[in-house]
Every structure is written in structure tokens, then in C-alpha cells.
Amino acid sequence: MDDLEKAILILFDEWGGGPIDEGLKKQAKDYCDESKEKPLICSVCIEKLCFSNSVQVQFWCLQTLHEVIRVRYSSMSLDEKFFIRKSVFSFACLEAIDEKNVARVLEGPAFIKNKLAQVLVTLIYFEYPLIWPSVFVDFMPHLSKGAVVIDMFCRVLNALDEEVISLDYPRTSGELEAAGRIKDAMRHQCISQIVRAWYDIVSLYRNSDQELCTSVLESMRRYISWIDIGLIVNDVFIPLLFDIVLAGGLLEQFRGAAAGCLLAVVSKRMEYQAKLSLLQSLQISRVFGLVAEDGDSELVSSIATLLTGYAQEVLECFKRLNSEEAKSVSMELLNEALPSVFYVMQNCEVDASFSIVQFLSSYVGTMKSLSPLRENQLVHVGHILEVIRAQICYDPAYRNNLDILDKIGREEQDRMVEFRKDLFVLLRNVGRVAPDVTQIFIKNVLGSSVASSPDRNVEEVEAALALFYALGESVSEDSMRFGSGLLSELVVMLLSTRFPCHSHRLVALAYLETVTRYMKHVHENTQYIPIVLTAFLDERGIHHPNINVSRRASYLFMRVVKLLKVNLVPFIEKILQSLQDTVAQFTSMDYASKDHSGCEDGSHIFEAIGLLIGMEDVPLEKQSEYLSALLTPLCQQVEALLMNAKLLSPEEAPAKIAIIQQIIVAINSLSKGFSERLVTTSRPAIGLMFKQTLDILLQVLVVYPKIEPLRIKVTSFIHRMVDTLGASVFPYLPKALEQLLAESEPKEMVDFLLLLNQIICKFNTLFNDILEEVFPTIAGRIFNVIPRDAFPSGPGTNTEEIRELQELQRTLYTFLHVITTHRLSSVFLSPKSRPYLDPIMQLLLSSSCNHKDILVRKGCVQIFITLIKDWCASPYSEEKVPGFQGFIIEHFATNCCLYSVLDRSFEFRDANTYVLFGEIVLAQKVMYEKFGDAFLRHFLSKGFPAAHCSQDMAEQYCQRLQGNDIKALKSFYQSHIENLRMQQNGSLVFR
């Protein structure tokens, strides 16, 4: 054993029988790597392959040969190439290298033979057919040496497919060219001999060595897609393949390999008329019965793949061919195959490349042109529906996980939601093609799922409900509302059925969602309202033991109330009585301590009650009674909690605060059912009750000024009262705004500004006096915390504090925009606000020129346009705001309207930027109208010369500006700016 062999064994941890030192291993690796670089390494490897019995040495030598040929082939001498070619071919054919030595590589394990095949294929890649045209022909005589060489030949063909020919792997253009060259040469020269050899080997060894025959057929399958199909589809080979598939006493792998070859024949690309003739001639129906033999066997899996592939091809022929005869033949073949295909879909492991949904969707698509459907097609529809039902069923193994919705249950639910999407699209298509069959199927499934065994009950009931829910999307609006017959029967069946597994979360949710989906039908058939109410109000809905179901039921019930509205007036007493415990529980200590994250926190039950009792159809006395019964205890509870707030220990306070939060949420939700017209005009007594409630809830801000969740809830309630009480809320606003402003941090100031935006948008100038009072405090707070220049950037600046300040600044821009566009700009000019006028103008100027958010820049320009219109009457008149005209002309006009658009970062092709440009052009028009020649003189004498604008262009600008066509001005100014940019060639440094 020489040093190289020792190094190889050390490299493979095969030296000395014990652990090998890492340093020694590194030395061995370096030695092996150096050996690879030596000129005679190929000869060394071939010699060792002849004499060494170590599989590690053999593998290293074959791997090295592979690498060296791949990398150095073009620089090798002819003699070296010949020696390598002769040696490698001899190894593969079990030939002597010279007169004495017969290499024993083929006696090694499979990975050695695969590596040898890879080396031989690398030579074929470079040399076939130009240098070594006889490689395949030369191999043929050696196949008579028996199984060892035949097996090696199969490995070479497999490696050739994987390394060069197959398009299942990404290929370079050079590899694609080589593959084309090799295939053309093989077709011309030797493929018929290879096919003949396949046939002879399988015929000869089918009883004595079925594993070898399996290898041969698996190799053959790879080549069928590109060889002459007539070599396989003939009176000799096809009968042999079917004979093997149907023979009961043979190995399953052998029969499966024959089925794989038939699938390759079926899938071969060709003209569709020829394909149809081929499919018809195969008489594939003879293997249909095999899929029922044993659902888990390897053979059944292969037959299943053959059948689904065959059905796909037949369906494609039906879609592609237009003649009546061709369509008739393909539909006949398809009808013959479909029962077995449906069996496969429901009982067998389907090949990953076959999409059940895609195939069935395609088949259902063909039915749209076949009206009315024939009897066998209606039967197929039933099978399709059964396939969908089977596919959408949850696995019972996840039943408990899905009930408590732990991590495993959530993952399975998310997976199934995604998986079902395409199946439900298919169901809706089936529902449109065969509505009656679909509805009868769902009716039967609903009925049978109720009676199914407990071990499948939950999953089958949930699947049946899911089918009925999904069907709703294929039902037209009129059918949903006025539908009679089957659909009406289904809805009644749904409403009146009590499922034994209703306690399970999945079933309860599916039931409630489905009932809600068909509520339009109930809207037109009001006799079902009592059944609906019972379903929502008993343990199937709002009183379900699972809190997540109960909360969802509250939300869905609110939607039901919104739809049925006046139809529910006769039932209000019953509903309120049923919900008493739910209402009380919502503001209890136990409920308040539970997780209320997400949009379904249980508060929707109050919104539902508000919608019910807030209708004008409810008599005033009853309405007042209902509302008082709800608001009075809630307000009393808040007052009691606030009164005792100072007596609470730090441990007790959080629980009490949580209850107050719940109460505010409940009242807020309740108020959504009452319109402004009702509480202010038709029934002011109701409005008074809400005003009294607001007065009490504002005390929360006094007692707990720094508790953020409470501030957020109270602010939300004020938003609601602004909408509900209208202008009658005004007396409460000064106190409310004062309290909210008293302890506000930047994050809370954002919420405060949003509230002011809502109030301004609703009341416009009516809000002027209150806004004048609070604006100076707002401006002072904000300009104290936001930077006068840009926010810092770079590492370490993306902190929570900086993000909050940036959000505050963005909200400030909106606030200023809302003020100016609602005729309230005089607020900026009040004596207390005057000190902040300059900081506001500077901020707006800087942002209109430089802010990275184009929408912010647009808003700032719009603010300036509005202020110019508000504060500047006409040219030559007295200034309303001293200094403002000069600021606009000297700073805004040149910096924003000229220099900022000259910057190449101002991208005209961006849609938002182009809108901003339109505002900038409009600003110039407004400035000319309000300032006249004063604007023009400064713009032309200071701005244009600095931008190297010619006198001629300046005169054209004047003409366009003084005209009435704003579009022409915009087009001219854009062209003007682009020309100036070209002249500057990117050297503009104004900013």
C-alpha cells in the first residue's frame, strides 16, 4: 500500500481502526489534492482500479477521473484520452485492461458502479459521436456476459439521462446542445439495437432475474419520450409490457416498471390525432381492475399513476381536437377510465405530478359545453363531489389539537385552509354545471354525517358543513334569497339539525358560518327566524362552552342582526333576556382577565344589541327602557370603580382597570346602533343618556391620566360620540381635549390629532373657537420633540422613539392639511398661535422640497396653495399676513417649484411624483393670480438665471403662465425642466 492509498483511507476514516487525528486528516486531504494536480494522475487511478480491493480507493479514483476529465479534457493528449477511454470501457464491460489484468470494479457495491457509469458518460459527453462513434454498438456484444454487464449498461443509460439528456434538471446551453447531438446520433445509429436488446433481455430473464428486468424497464422508460415511438408501440413490445403488468406471479416492482413504460408511451408528446389513435389502440382498460387489488402496494401506486396520466392525455385530446368523431372517441375513452380514476383519487396514493383538482377542474370545464348532461356524466359529477368531500376531511388524529387549537392544531388548520381553496373553486364550478346533483349530494352528506360513527363524526360533519358553505358562492343572489325546492330544504335541514359533535370547536364554527352565509334566504323566509335565533342564542352559538366559538358567534350574530334588522323587533325581549348572562359576564372580573387580543373580543354582542334597540321601529319608551337597563348599571360600575381607585393596592388596580376597559368597549359597541338623527332630532332623550355616559367616562381620564389602554378606549368612545351626538357633543369637547392633552406622549399625541381630524372634517368652521384654544398647546408640544431638520439616519437611529416621532410628524402634516382644507387657516394667525407660524412654514417648506415621501410633499404643496388663496386677496392689495407673500415668492417659489423639480431624483415617470408635479404647476398659477408681477419678476430674475434658463424660454414660460390652459402649462414646464436638466448634466447643486 503506497502513500496515496494510505492518505485516501485516512480521508475516509478507514485507517487504523480508531479515531483519526484532525491534523493527520488535513495532511491526508492536502496530499490527495496535490496528487490530483499531477500530470499522470489518470494513469495512477486506472492502475489502482485494476489492483486495489478497497472500495474507498476505488471511489476516490473514479471521482478523481470524473473531475479530471471534466476539467482537463481539452488539454489532454490523444494518447492519454485513448488510454482513459479504453480502460474505462473495459471496466464497464468486464474486459481485461491488458493480457493479465481483469479489473473487478463491477464486483463492487452500487455506488462504485454508479460512479463508473458517471465517468463513462462524461467521456460520451465529450466524444460521442465524432471521436468515439461506436461506444453503444461496442457495448452490445458484451451484454451476453450476463446480468453484471447488463446491469452496468442500465446504469450508463440512466447516468446519461440524468447527467446530459433529461430536462428535469437545469441545463446550460452547451449541455442542451450536447444532449441534442447525442440523441440525434443514437436515433440514427443504435437506438433500435438498444430497444431490441431491452426486449431480448426482458424476455430472457423475466422468470429468472426479475430485478434485472426491472432495471432494464426503468432505464427504457427514461428514453421513450424521445425515441421513435414505433420501436415500442408495436405488436411485439406492447403485448410484452401488458403481459408483465397483468401477470400475477411476478415481482410488484417488475410489474410497476412495465406500467411506468406504458405511462411513458401514453405521455409521449405528439400530434393530438395521432395521440388519440395511440391511446385507443392501447386498450388500457385491461389494467383498470388492478387498482382494487391492494391499496397500499407499490404496484397499485404505479397503476394509479398510469391511469391518471392516461386520463389526463385523453382529456387533453378531447379539448384539442375539434372533429365530432375525435371528441366522441376521446369522451368514450374518458368515460371508460373515469370510474377507476375516481377510485384512485379516493383510495390510492396519487403521484405528486398529478393534480387531482387541476384534472377535475379541466373535466368539469368540458361539461359546460355539454348541456344537458347525460346520465353517466351526472354519475361522474357525483364521484367528483365524493372526491372533494374525501379530500377536505380533516385527519381524526388532529381532532383534539383542532378543538383546543394548540400549535399543532393551528398549523393543521392553516394547512387545510390553504389546501381547500382550489377544491372549493372546483366545488363551485360543479355547483354551476350541475346544481341539483350538487345540492342533493350535500343534503345526503349532511344526513349521513349526523349518523356516522363517533370516530369519524366530527370530521365528516365539518366537511359536510364546509361543502354547504362553499356552495353558497356558486348560488346566484336570486336563488339565495328566493330559492325554493332543494336549496330551501337544505337551509331548513341545516337550521333544524343538532349535530351530536356540536361541542367541537371546528363543527360549531363551521355550523355558525354556514348559517350566516344563507341568512339572505332567511331574510326572505322570515318563518325561519325563530330557528336561527335559537341556534345563535343556545349552546351551539353564543352560549357555547368554547370561548372562541362564543366570541365568533357574537360577531356573526351581529351580522345577522344587521341583515334582518326590523324583522327582529318582535323578538327583542326574548333576545335580551337570553343575553343577560353574556352581557353581565363581559364586564365581570373573570372575563376581563382573559385574552382579548384580535378583533373578536366578545364586544360584538353589544353592537348587535345596539343595532336591535337603536332602530326607530322600537317604541321610544321601550327604547329608553332597554338602553337605560344597559347603560345605568355599566355607568354605576364605572363610578364605583373610580371612587375607590385611590384605595386600591397595586395588586388590585390592574384587574379593576381591565373591567373599566371592558365597560368602555361595551358602551362604545352599543352606541354603534344609534344614528345621529335619532339621538339628536327624533329622540333627544336617547342622546341625553349618551351625553351623561360620556360625562362619566371622561372622569376616567381625570382619575387615570397615564394609563394608556384607558386613554385609547376613551378616545375611541369620543370618536364614536362625535359621530353619534353631532354638534351636541361640543360642550363636552373642551374638557375632553384638555384631559387628553394633559399627559400626552408622542404616541398618544398621534391619537389625539386623529380625533381632531375627525372633528374638523365633521364640523368645519364650527370647531374654530375650540381649535384656537388647543392649537398653541399642540404646536408647542410637537415642535418641542420633533427635530427642526431631518431625522437622523444611519446605524442605531431606527429606535422605537425615533419611529414614534416620525409617525407624529406624518400625522402633523395630515392635521395641518385638514385645518387648511376646512377653512380654518385663521387658527394659525391667532395671537397665541403666531409664535408657531414661522416653524410651521419652515417645516412645510423643507418637506415640500425634500421629504422622501412624495405624498407628504404633495400635501405640503397643497397646504401652501390653500394658504395663498386664504391669506392673499389679489395683487397690489394690503397683506393680510405681513411677510407671507415675500416668504412664498422668495423661498417656496424658487426652492420648491423650480430647484426641487430640477433635481434628478424627481422622477416624472413615477405616478405619485407626476401628481405632485401637477400641484407644483398649479401653485405657480395661483401665485401669479394672487401676486401678479411681483411673483414673475422674482421667479424670472432670481430662479431662472440660476438654473441657466435662456431669455427665450423665460418669455415662453410667461406666455403659458398668463394663459388659461393649465394642461399646456404643465406640459411646457415639464419639457422646460427636462431641457434644463440636460444642460446642467447632473451638476445642479442648488439644494
Image (tube, helix red, strand yellow):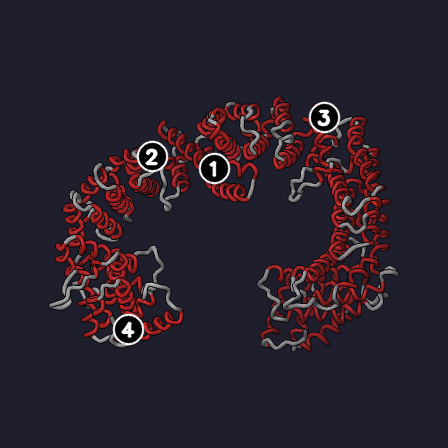
Mark 2 is surrounded, within 10 Å at the Cα level, by few (under 14), some (14 to 19) or many (20 or more) other residues, namely some
Q: Quadrant of residue 908?
A: bottom right
Determine contact: label 3, label 2, CB under 8 Å: no
Precedes in sequence: disc 2 or disc 1? 2
Report the amino acid beneath label 4. Answer: Asp
Give the SS element for disc 4: helix
Q: CA distance from mark 3 to mark 2?
A: 56 Å
Q: Is residue 969 visible?
A: no
Amino acid type of the residue that numbered disc 3 sits on in the rendered structure: Gln
Secondary structure, mark 1, is: helix
Return the residue at label 2. Answer: 338
Q: Quote the CA–CA distance across marks 4 and 2.
A: 66 Å
- Where is residue 629 drawn, in percent x and y? 79, 30
Residue, disc 4: 3
Residue positioned 14% across, 46% down in the render: 204
Q: Position of residue 50 (x, y in %)?
A: 19, 66
Q: Quick one: label 3 or label 2, which is nearer the N terminus?
A: 2
Q: Quadrant of residue 163?
A: bottom left
- Quadrant in which the N terminus appears: bottom left
Q: Residues within 10 Å of mark 1 (few under 14, many from 20)?
A: few
Q: Secondary structure at mark 2?
A: helix
Q: Would residue 568 be found to the left or right of residue 92 on screen?
A: right
At which x and y percent is residue 567? Answer: 67, 26
Q: CA distance from mark 3 to mark 1?
A: 40 Å
The three-letter code of the residue at mark 1 reads Ala
| x 18%, y 41%: residue | 239
Query: Which percent across, then down, holds residue 907?
Result: 60, 66
The residue under label 3 is 577
The quadrant of the picture occupied by the C terminus is bottom right
Provide the residue designation for mark 1. 397
